[in-house]
């Protein structure tokens, strides 16, 4: 790789790192909201709402196409996030 390309790569990676830091703050906010949702649930079987999951994934696909983002990427990200939070809720359910 040429020195010019290395420099460009370094700049791009710096921007990615900054974006990752922003995502961490967003994930923290999302986690706090999920904790509030969990506090409202009375039974462990209320944690997984398949209709809501399908609704979210349909909307993500529509928004992805509208914004010219590969929907396979966003679908994988949201599915992983949804199931990570389901696991979080199951581990933190205290009733």
Image (spheres, rainbow, N blue to C red):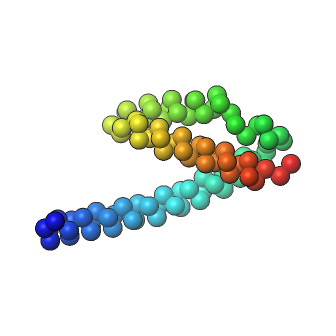
Along the line of sight, which residue is nearer the eye, 54 or 39?
Answer: 54
Q: Is residue 2 left or right of residue 72?
A: left
Which image quadrant is residue 3 in? Answer: bottom left
Residue 20 placement: quadrant: bottom left
Residue 59's x, y, as percent? 50, 32
Q: Position of residue 42 (x, y in %)?
A: 84, 41
Rendered residue at 59%/59% (across/down): 28
What is the residue that sits farthest to the right in this orientation? Answer: 95
Please identify the quadrant where the N terminus is shown. Answer: bottom left
Nearer to us in this view, 6 or 68: 6
Query: What residue is shown at x 54% (from left), y 40% (from top)?
Result: 79
One can see residue 56 in this view? yes
Determine whether, in the image, residue 46 is placed left or right of residue 19: right
Callout count: 0
- Using the image, determine if residue 61 lies above or below residue 24: above
User: Which residue is situated farthest in the front direction here?
Assistant: 1
The structure residue drawn at horizontal position 20% and vertical position 70%, both measured from the top left corner, is: 7
* 46 w.r.t. 37: above or below: above
Residue 36 visible, this orientation: no
Answer left or right for 22 relative to 65.
right
Residue 33 image point, x, y percent? 66, 51
Q: Quadrant of residue 10?
A: bottom left
Would you say 12 lies left or right of 1 here? right
Tell me what residue is drawn at x 33 percent, y 37 percent. Answer: 68
């Amino acid at each position: 790789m040429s020195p010019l390309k290395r420099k460009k790569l370094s700049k791009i990676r710096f921007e990615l790192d900054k974006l990752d830091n922003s995502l961490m703050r967003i994930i923290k906010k999302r986690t706090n909201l999920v904790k509030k949702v969990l506090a409202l649930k009375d039974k462990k079987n209320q944690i997984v709402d398949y209709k809501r999951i399908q609704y979210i994934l349909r909307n993500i696909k529509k928004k992805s196409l509208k914004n010219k983002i590969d929907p396979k990427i966003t679908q994988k990200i949201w599915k992983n996030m949804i199931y990570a939070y389901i696991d979080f809720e199951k581990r933190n359910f205290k009733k």
